């Protein structure tokens, strides 16, 4: 029997290379899909809250922003407990399972009971259930980031997670938008109670299945032997958060780059934005689902190319290149829609506007997909950087520091959309597909869909200039970590996993 499990690729240089089987990485990537499914479903909460529960646009927009901030605040707390946890069921699996159960229960309560309560009780009940929902969401999402370090530490394998993550999430968001725009909305006549009942049932069942598969994927690696340098969890306190943030410059820069991109992504995924962009500016809301389906193949192809670049040239190179590509194509798309006639864009009218729009939109979204899918493995790199400079293995703390700032910034999405719409006259209800297009709605729609993402990518390009973890630097860090581990093994202060019979 080999003395080392999945750690034999480069024994002469680094016997501590920890790799996972391909199916394990693929299964665990579904943990992110499971939580993204709830994020997608909760993106339509504004329509439920204003159209069915009777809350106003300004109240719900402000409330959702406050809840997003609360979501960020819970991250460091839960990250602290993840780093402290060591049970017979592992460090991550208990949080994944409990989190998904909480998500399912709170969605059932929120969408089925809120509107049936007396009017005075609706807002307090909504706030309470949403707060519990956020705790469950953080339980599960924190594990996606933190468990990357035990899944694999091989710089060549770490980007593979992005291939699975990109595939699953492209199918989720594109297929989800098609399901909403082309099936459920026409079937139920809009965002009705029947719509939410059917859609949420689908989301709950699918997310539960994804979570079970993710638990299976991480099962073998969710063991003490893979938790950093020591046989015991690192002692941490809440006061340790600030020194980590202050000294970990790569984490700072990644947070800025990813959070601004996330803000743009959150704005685009606000349900009213596709209504404005496709339904009003182009005059065909169903086009959003159809065009999204068309983008699946090119998006995945470009993402796989980006992952190939990441495996050979590092995650940073792939992230920066894709960011430039997204910025340039969206700038051209903005000019096309301002100069041309957006209503000429139709799959039944294959003129210049349709062809040019499809090429730029598909290319821009494909580049956007690459940037988004590079972030999670880059978080693992910043965790390894922290271990390298301090000797402390704190994946929960690093992952939730990232999430905390990321959510604080991206929490502005709902408020930005709600307040801007309120300023142009939509204070009590959001625009719908039959709302007449005005110049204000035209420019607001372009700003939401194209302008905010471009601003986010500019911020990312600037931040990445100060992010040192390229391919060469990560190779040095992994070698130095391996050297420390070898010293500890020689002193018999730690052990390494043995193959299971």
Image (spheres, helix red, strand yellow):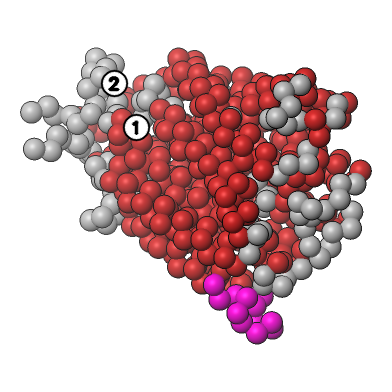
Q: Quadrant of residue 111?
A: bottom right
Spot the residue most to the front: 348
Q: Secondary structure at mark 2?
A: loop
What residue would you read off at disc 1? 152
Q: Nearer the viewer, residue 479 or 140?
A: 140
Residue at (27% x, 17% y) in the render: 10
Q: Is residue 117 magenta?
A: yes
Q: Quadrant of the C terminus?
A: top left
Q: Is residue 185 above or below residue 124?
A: above
Residue at (71% x, 44% y) in the render: 285
Q: Is residue 77 above or below residue 119?
A: above
Residues rendered magenta in the picture: 112-123
* Image spot of residue 94 (x, y percent): 33, 57
Spot the residue most to the right: 439
Q: Is residue 125 magenta?
A: no
Q: Secondary structure at mark 1?
A: loop
What residue would you read off at disc 2? 14
């Amino acid at each position: 029997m080999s003395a080392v499990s999945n750690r034999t690729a480069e024994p002469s240089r680094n016997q501590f290379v920890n790799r996972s089987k391909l199916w394990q990485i693929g299964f665990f990537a579904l943990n992110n899909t499971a939580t993204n499914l709830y994020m997608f479903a909760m993106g339509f909460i504004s329509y439920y809250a204003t159209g069915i529960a009777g809350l106003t646009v300004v109240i719900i927009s402000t409330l959702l922003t406050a809840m997003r901030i609360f979501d960020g605040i819970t991250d460091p707390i839960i990250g602290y407990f993840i780093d402290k946890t060591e049970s017979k069921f592992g460090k991550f699996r208990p949080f994944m399972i409990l989190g998904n159960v909480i998500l399912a229960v709170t969605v059932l309560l929120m969408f089925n009971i809120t509107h049936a309560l007396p009017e005075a009780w609706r807002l307090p009940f909504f706030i309470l259930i949403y707060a519990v929902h956020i705790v469950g969401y953080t339980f599960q999402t924190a594990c996606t980031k933190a468990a990357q370090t035990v899944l694999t530490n091989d710089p060549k394998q770490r980007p593979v997670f992005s291939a699975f993550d990109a595939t699953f999430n492209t199918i989720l968001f594109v297929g989800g938008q098609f399901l909403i725009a082309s099936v459920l909305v026409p079937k139920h006549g809009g965002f009705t109670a029947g719509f939410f009942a059917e859609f949420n049932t689908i989301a709950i069942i699918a997310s539960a299945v994804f979570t079970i598969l993710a638990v299976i994927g991480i099962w073998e690696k969710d063991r003490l032997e893979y938790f950093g340098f020591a046989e015991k969890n690192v002692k941490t306190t809440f006061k340790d958060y600030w020194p980590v943030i202050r000294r970990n410059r790569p984490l700072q820069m990644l947070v800025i780059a990813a959070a601004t991109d996330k803000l743009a992504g959150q704005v685009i995924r606000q349900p009213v934005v596709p209504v404005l962009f496709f339904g009003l500016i182009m005059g065909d809301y169903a086009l959003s689902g159809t065009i999204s389906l068309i983008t699946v193949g090119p998006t995945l192809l470009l993402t796989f190319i980006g992952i190939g670049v990441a495996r050979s040239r590092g995650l940073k190179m792939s992230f920066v290149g894709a960011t430039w590509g997204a910025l340039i194509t969206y700038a051209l798309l903005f000019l096309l829609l301002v100069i041309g006639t957006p209503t000429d864009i139709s799959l039944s009218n294959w003129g210049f506007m349709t062809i040019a729009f499809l090429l730029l939109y598909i290319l821009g979204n494909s580049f956007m997909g690459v940037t988004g899918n590079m972030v999670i493995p880059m978080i693992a790199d910043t965790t390894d950087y922290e271990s390298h400079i301090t000797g402390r293995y704190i994946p929960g703390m690093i992952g939730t520091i990232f999430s905390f700032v990321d959510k604080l910034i991206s929490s502005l999405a709902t408020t930005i959309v709600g307040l801007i719409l309120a300023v142009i006259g939509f204070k009590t209800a959001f625009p719908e597909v039959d709302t007449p297009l005005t110049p204000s709605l035209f420019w607001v729609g372009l700003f939401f869909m194209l302008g905010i993402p471009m601003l986010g990518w500019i911020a990312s390009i600037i931040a990445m200039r100060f992010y040192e973890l390229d391919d060469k630097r990560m190779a040095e860090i992994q070698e130095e970590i391996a050297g420390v581990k070898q010293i500890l093994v020689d002193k018999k202060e730690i052990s390494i996993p043995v193959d299971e019979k």
